Image (cartoon, rainbow, N blue to C red):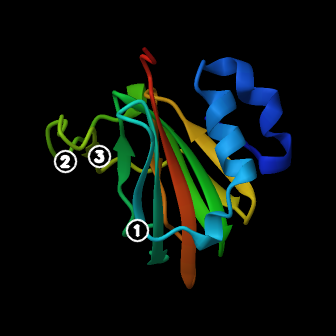
Amino acid sequence: MIFSALAQACRYAALHPLFPQAFAYLRDTDLNALTLGVHQIIDKQLFIIVEEANGRTRAEAKLEAHRKYIDIQLVLDGVDEMGWQALADCHQPLDEHNVERDIRFFDDKPAAWIAVPPQHFCIFFPEDAHAPLVGKGAIRKVIVKIAVDAG
C-alpha cells in the first residue's frame, strides 16, 4: 500500500506500465465534472469509477481485496479513512472471490487506518486488503482500476 499526494504521483509512475497514463489522467482531467459511474480509458486495462457515498463507521466497513486490478483511490471531497491489512493475514473470508467483480470480502479487522484527505490517494495492490469509505459525511472519490497484467 502507498499513501501520497496527487502532487507527488510522479514518484510512483515507474511501478507499473500504466501508472504514467493513470496519473496523467488524474492530473489533467476535471474530475469533479465527471458523472458518477465507470469511465473507460483503455478497455479492461485502465478505467476509473467515480463514486460518492456517505461515510460509514469502522465497524461497518469490510476489508476487500482484488486479484486482477490495482486500485488507486483518490479522494476528491471529504476524508476517507481507509483501513488496511495484508491479504496474507486475512483469515475470515465472507465469501468466495467474485471473478466477474474481481472482489472478495473479509471479516478480519484492519491492522491500520489512514485518513486520506482531498487530493491524496492510496494505491492498493492485490496483496493489500482495504476497507474504504469510512468517515463522517459525504465522500467523493475516484478509483482508478489498473490491470495487474497490462498487455
Vertical arrangement, residue 129 with respect to residue 76, above or below: above
- Quarter of the image where the N terminus is located: top right
The residue where tag 1 is placed is: 59
Instruction: Return the residue found at the far bottom.
Output: 137
The residue where tag 3 is placed is: 106
Q: Earlier in the sequence, mark 1 or mark 2?
A: 1
Whether residue 57 is visible to the viewer of this picture, yes or no, is no
Which residue is located at x 74 percent, y 51 percent? 28
Left or right, residue 64 beside residue 80: left
Crowd around label 1: few <14 · some 14–19 · many ≥20 (10 Å): few
Q: Nearer the viewer, residue 31 or 111?
A: 31
The residue where tag 2 is placed is: 94
Q: Nearer the viewer, residue 127 or 118?
A: 118
Q: How many marks?
A: 3
Q: Amino acid at mark 3?
A: Phe
Local secondary structure at mark 3 = strand
Query: Label 3 near label 1: C-beta < 8 Å?
Result: no
Query: CA gap, disc 1 to disc 3?
Result: 13 Å
Q: Whole-percent x and y of residue 48?
A: 48, 50
Q: Earlier in the sequence, mark 2 or mark 3?
A: 2
Q: Earlier in the sequence, mark 1 or mark 3?
A: 1
Q: Whole-percent x and y of residue 14?
A: 72, 18
Q: Nearer the viewer, residue 82 or 44?
A: 44
Query: CA gap, disc 2 to disc 3?
Result: 5 Å
Vertical arrangement, residue 72 with respect to residue 45, above or below: below
Query: Label 3 near label 2: C-beta < 8 Å?
Result: yes
Q: Whole-percent x and y of residue 10?
A: 81, 32
Crowd around label 3: few <14 · some 14–19 · many ≥20 (10 Å): many
